[in-house]
């Protein structure tokens, strides 16, 4: 009854000893296992295979695949052979060729893939120093070097190695499935009957029991456009493409030449697939598996199994691009209508959905060519659009989507979206309301398709805020132009509303003094409903070390701590050190300094998928207690970070992710923007802000973004007099100093 014992018995082979006794053993196995329980054994193996694939990630293209048990792993070959042994009483895969189960070419491909996986697995065992079948991220570079893969200009050796792995694993998955299908399907009594009785979709194409197949192979040579049309048939019928048809299509891929790619009929059919109401993702995936998508759009085919060696990209570039289509389709189907009503509405109302789908497919098409992939990708997309005979407007829109696919999230996550000038400039860059809507949907799908941890409510709220603000600008522009309200007039309107809310409890002169002491920027960037609470806290401040309030926003997945204290050098760094020591991840911080030296720092802290921990009152009691001790000088904050059980940033170490310091003096009228990209680790924000304190830089806004292993921290800063830092030598000193605080000495500044 034990599955492992059964498999072991099937794998038994004669080594030495009594050959007659071994013959008796073989007869016993055949009688009791291969004859009596044949169908049951096959059902159990197939069920076990499905569960195993689910248990090990359900995809060939995982960041850290399991070479033995994962999909496309060695166990898939074992399973195919075991089932073939039971059905055909063969001892090895070679014996399946004379039986017509597998062709010689297919057998050679499978053996080559198996040999590659064996070599990778052996090298992994050597590298790890133990039996380990998961090709862990940290082992991939060592294994690739041992197998002779080297960096080659635009492609790193480890990325070339992983691409080879995915290509070979996908071969294993395809060919093992093909063997199992041919062995089991041919034995079904209903197999032939279904093929004869199945409904004819059109001449040469039939469907039965949810499976579609080409009943007359001659239709492919007679009309090569059937290489695409058959997938449209499957989409329309809600049927999957049969194994035989997929392999038949593969054998005819040479028919897809440049003439085919420019065929109006072929392109019209492909665009119909994209316009169809459902199963767009499934259909494109089927086309990709059969090699049709890459042959029809060779620029996309170049992305096949392309790997990026970082922890952020969980899937290969081609699979990631296809997953964008799936994410948009889920949105369009209403799967998230309760939690994402605006995005759902936009997806359902999108008129040129086929252009958006093309934008999703092509957004990363410039990767692997060196240089900025967005600009390169836009040029490639324009070339494809012309080949597909898209009109000028559709071509321009597709080109815009590919060129701009990173702009929305970069602006929302790395810039001050409360800055009216920035929003107006961003909206103008969009060009039209339709461009903005499409880019919003693309950005959502891109984030969802990267991995499960990338999209969250906090990021979603930032994107939605920027989208809505930009939409207002564009709609106003369409009605006759954008009128930028006078800054002072806007502040007066806000203050008038706040004054009415405070009038019952506070004297007018106190409110007036508050208005006069706070910078205009505070009123323009602070949610109006929060201003009375800030006023009350600052009114209650006397000689305390600090005062604070904590609010929780569960629906947006963050908590907010507002801190009022007397300004002092390095105060912001001290506070970030306390957050680091208590395991809290800062999303953003806005710093306001009153004319009398009182400061108001407002921190937003991520719930990190565990709101019950971050919202725990005891957690914040500890934060407050530590903050009081740090501000009193009874605890050294650098030591506090170091002793929090994590490596200190002051122990120099070169990160896996390159550190880049970029300074922008154009995006903001008031501040210099410092962008820091570096390896993520606890306390990195403290290290940066402590360095800025040492440099005499005043921080006015911090926006923190983390992509698994890389942080992108952006700071709006000013000099000691509150102005932009313009001196080139001073800016270079800032870059060098921050860099030295983050990486080991001797590495050049990027």
Image (cartoon, rainbow, N blue to C red):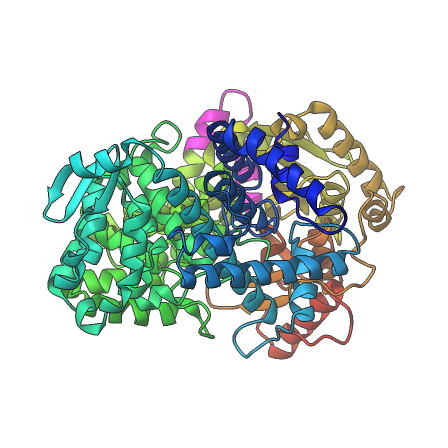
Q: Main secondary structure of the magenta part?
A: helix
Where is residue 379 shown, x and y percent of the image? Answer: 31, 72
Residue beneath the point at 49% across and 31% down = 38
Residue beneath the point at 29% across and 34% down = 333
Q: Is residue 112 above or below residue 315?
A: below
Front-lying residue, 141 or 455:
141
Where is residue 670 shown, x and y percent of the image? Answer: 50, 61
Whether the magenta-drawn stretch holds residue 295 is answered as: no
Residue 118: image quadrant is bottom right
Q: Is residue 594 left or right of residue 400?
A: right
Q: Is residue 327 above or below residue 652?
A: above
Is residue 557 shown to the viewer in this render?
Answer: no
Q: Quadrant of the C terminus?
A: bottom right
Is residue 411 shown to the viewer in this render?
Answer: yes
Whether the magenta-drawn stretch holds residue 514 is answered as: yes
Front-lying residue, 356 or 489:
356
Residue 688: image quadrant is bottom right
Q: Is residue 367 above or below residue 200?
A: below
Write the start and end of the magenta stretch as one range: 497-519
Where is residue 407 shown, x and y percent of the image? Answer: 41, 58
- Which residue occupies the extreme front position in the image? 20
Residue beneath the point at 58% across and 46% down = 75
- Which residue occupies the extreme right position in the image? 634
Front-lying residue, 26 or 127:
26
Where is residue 188 shown, x and y percent of the image? Answer: 34, 33
Q: Quadrant of the N terminus?
A: top right
Counting the numbered discs, the total is 0
- Which residue occupies the extreme top position in the image? 504
Q: Is residue 535 left or right of residue 691?
A: left
Front-lying residue, 135 or 174:
174
């Amino acid at each position: 009854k034990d599955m492992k014992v059964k498999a072991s018995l099937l794998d038994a082979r004669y080594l030495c000893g009594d050959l007659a006794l071994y013959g008796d053993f073989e007869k016993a196995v055949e009688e009791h296992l291969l004859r009596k329980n044949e169908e049951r054994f096959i059902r159990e193996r197939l069920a076990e295979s499905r569960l195993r694939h689910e248990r090990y990630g359900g995809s060939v293209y995982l960041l850290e695949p399991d070479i033995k048990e994962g999909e496309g792993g060695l166990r898939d070959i074992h399973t195919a052979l075991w089932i073939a042994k039971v059905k055909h009483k063969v001892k090895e895969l070679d014996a399946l060729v004379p039986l017509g189960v597998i062709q010689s070419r297919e057998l050679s491909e499978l053996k080559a893939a198996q040999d590659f996986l064996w070599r990778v697995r052996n090298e992994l065992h050597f590298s790890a120093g133990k039996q380990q079948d998961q090709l862990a991220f940290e082992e991939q570079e060592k294994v690739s070097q041992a197998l002779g893969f080297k960096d080659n200009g635009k492609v790193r050796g480890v990325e070339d190695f992983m691409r080879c792995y995915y290509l070979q694993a996908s071969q294993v998955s395809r060919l093992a499935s093909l063997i199992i299908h041919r062995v089991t399907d041919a034995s079904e009594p209903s197999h032939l009957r279904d093929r004869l009785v199945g409904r004819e979709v059109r001449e040469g194409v039939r469907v039965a029991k949810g499976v579609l197949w080409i009943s007359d192979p001659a239709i492919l040579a007679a009309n090569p456009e059937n290489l695409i049309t058959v997938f449209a048939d499957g989409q329309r019928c809600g049927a999957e493409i049969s194994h035989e048809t997929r392999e038949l299509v593969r054998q005819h891929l040479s028919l897809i030449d440049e003439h085919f790619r420019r065929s109006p009929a072929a392109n019209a059919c492909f665009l119909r697939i994209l316009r169809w109401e459902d199963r767009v993702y499934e259909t494109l995936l089927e086309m990709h598996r059969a090699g049709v998508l890459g042959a029809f759009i060779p620029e996309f085919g170049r992305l096949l199994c392309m790997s990026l060696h970082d922890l952020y990209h969980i899937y290969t570039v081609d699979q990631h691009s296809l997953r964008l289509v799936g994410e948009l389709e889920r949105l369009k189907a209403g799967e998230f209508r309760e939690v994402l009503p605006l995005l759902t509405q936009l997806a359902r109302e999108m008129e040129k959905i086929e252009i958006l789908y093309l934008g999703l497919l092509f957004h990363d098409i410039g990767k692997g060519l060196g240089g900025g992939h967005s600009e390169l990708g836009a040029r490639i997309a324009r070339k494809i659009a012309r080949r597909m005979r898209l009109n000028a407007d559709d071509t321009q829109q597709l080109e815009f989507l590919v060129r701009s696919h990173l702009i929305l999230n970069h602006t929302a996550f790395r810039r001050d979206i409360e800055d009216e000038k920035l929003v107006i400039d961003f909206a103008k860059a969009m060009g039209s309301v339709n461009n903005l809507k499409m880019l919003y949907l693309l950005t959502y799908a891109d984030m969802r398709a990267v991995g499960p941890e990338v999209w969250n409510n906090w990021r979603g709220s930032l994107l939605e805020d920027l989208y809505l603000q930009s939409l207002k600008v564009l709609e106003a522009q369409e009605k006759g132009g954008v009128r930028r309200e006078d800054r002072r007039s806007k502040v007066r309107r806000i203050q008038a509303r706040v004054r009415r809310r405070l009038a019952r409890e506070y004297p007018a002169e106190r409110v007036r003094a508050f208005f006069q002491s706070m910078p205009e920027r505070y009123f323009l960037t602070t949610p109006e409903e929060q201003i009375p609470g800030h006023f009350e806290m600052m009114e209650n401040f006397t000689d305390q070390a600090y005062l604070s309030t904590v609010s929780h926003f569960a629906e947006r997945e963050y908590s907010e701590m507002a801190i009022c204290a007397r300004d002092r050098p390095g105060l912001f760094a001290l506070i970030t050190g306390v957050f680091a020591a208590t395991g809290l991840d800062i999303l953003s911080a806005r710093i306001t300094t009153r004319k009398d030296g009182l400061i108001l720092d407002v921190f937003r802290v991520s719930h990190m998928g565990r709101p019950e921990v971050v919202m725990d009152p005891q957690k914040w009691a500890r934060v407050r207690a530590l903050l009081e001790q740090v501000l009193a000088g009874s605890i050294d904050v650098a030591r506090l970070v170091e002793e929090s059980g994590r490596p200190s940033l002051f122990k120099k170490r070169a990160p896996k992710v390159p550190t880049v310091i970029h300074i922008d003096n154009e995006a903001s009228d008031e501040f210099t923007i410092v962008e820091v990209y570096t390896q993520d680790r606890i306390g990195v924000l403290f290290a940066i802000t402590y360095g800025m304190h040492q440099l005499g830089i005043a921080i006015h806004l911090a926006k923190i973004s983390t992509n698994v292993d890389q942080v992108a921290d952006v700071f709006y800063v000013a000099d000691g007099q509150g102005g932009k830092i313009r001196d080139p030598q001073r800016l270079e000193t800032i870059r060098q100093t921050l860099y030295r605080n983050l990486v080991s000495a001797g590495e050049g500044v990027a």
